[in-house]
Image (spheres, rainbow, N blue to C red):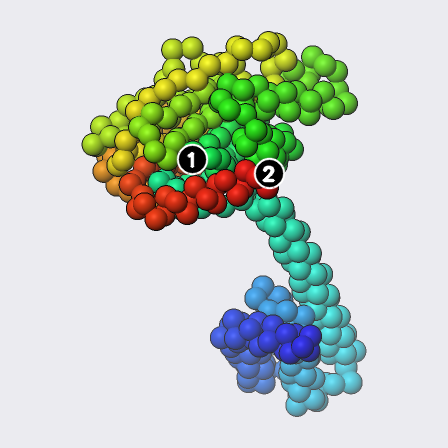
Amino acid sequence: MHVGQHLGRVRRLWQSSHALVAIPLGLILVITVADLRTPESISLGPLLVAAPAITTSFAGPRLTGLIGVLAVGAHVLISSLQGGLTAVTQIAAITGLAILSVFAVFVCWVRDRRQEELAQVRSVAEAAQRALLRPLPHRLGPLHIAYSYLAAEKEARIGGDLYAVARTEGRTRVIIGDVRGHGLAAIGEAATLLGAFQEAAHHHATLPALADALDRSVCRYLTQFPEADDEAQEHFITALLLEIPDHGRVARVTHCGHPPPLLIRHGRVTSVMPPHPSPPLGMFVLGPDVRTSHTFTFDAGDTLLLYTDGVVEARDRDRAFYPLEERVTEWARSGPETLVRHLHRDLLDHADRALSDDAALLAIQRSSVPPGERRFDELSSRTDVRRA
């Protein structure tokens, strides 16, 4: 099986590069013919080194070695036909060509090894990132969900932004958050909050109580920093907690220093902003009963757009911020997937594909659920609660 995979890989490499092989082969042929037709005082043989050098740009060590052998053979043919195979200059030129061809093969081998190592590292990193920020279901009870994540760090799929959902008895709880900072350095705090949410969402009756539990988890994590306490206090996480019942019009939201969601209803866009938002998680200064929840109507057909500040703080070349609410209005009558897809592309175009911070989008649309599906969702949620 291993041999078959290796042969398949070689075959794919050959298929991707065999068309380009005509360039060094044609170069060897042209130089050979031209050298044979020019006076013996003019030697074009040293130019054959260009053939293996060009091959290193698109082929592996085996094909580069083959082109090098052909180039050396062509040089030997030219020297023998011109009667100078025993000349010191010709022997030196052939030897130099052979050494350079071997060096080209070595360069290809080192490059391929590093590419394989990089591919393995990327594979492990992507697996770890998927395990941390799991894909959300597209349907959850009466909710239709679409999401998008844009990491500011190159080669990264996630960073300091986070989102997750949890089903409890007859309701869905959602969290979206933003760790101070961005990129891979913020993943540790994001993982702590996500793990705490997935557990605590099943054990607290209200969103303020859930927010307090998450705040304690974040504070415990931050106290484990080896730096001084005053530096640890500079770390915090803005978060928004959302609770949507399966059989009711009233949804609840708790703001912890996070941007307010946008409510889309009949093509109109409004901001769901509570009168007294709470400070972010991990501030070390809050006592009990400080956080509150805000209620709003969330009917069938309504859509909620949750986002992180990396979206609204994205700048274009003129340093203008991204006008999220204005752009949402343009696609206010679209479904969640279409809305998120348009915003994803438009945000990248606005920032010239160079975001300065991680950006997450989460669209949730409420729809009516058939009675049979409702009973199945309720039974599944109760089973999950008992297992938790």
| Residue where numbered disc 1 is placed | 170
Label 2 is placed on what type of residue?
Ala
State the count of labels: 2
Query: Of residues 129 and 368, which is closer to you in this image?
Result: 368
The residue at the point 66 percent across, 87 percent down is 77
Q: Secondary structure at mark 2?
A: loop
Q: Is residue 291 left or right of residue 186?
A: left
The residue at the point 66 percent across, 90 percent down is 81
Q: Is residue 192 visible?
A: yes
Query: Of residues 41 and 60, which is closer to you in this image?
Result: 60
In which quadrant will I find the C terminus? top right
Q: Is residue 155 visible?
A: no
- 378 vs 63: above or below: above
Query: Residue 307: image x %, image y %?
Result: 42, 30
Which badge, 2 or 1, is on the more N-terminal residue? 1
- 379 vs 160: above or below: below
The residue at the point 55 percent across, 81 percent down is 29
| Residue where numbered disc 2 is placed | 388
Q: Quadrant of residue 352?
A: top left
Q: Circle 1: is it few (<14), some (14-19), or many (20+) Cα within 10 Å? A: some
Query: Residue 23: image x %, image y %?
Result: 52, 73
Q: Secondary structure at mark 1?
A: loop
Q: Are marks 2 and 1 in contact (CB under 8 Å)?
A: no
Q: Circle 2: is it few (<14), some (14-19), or many (20+) Cα within 10 Å? A: few
| Residue 12 marker | none
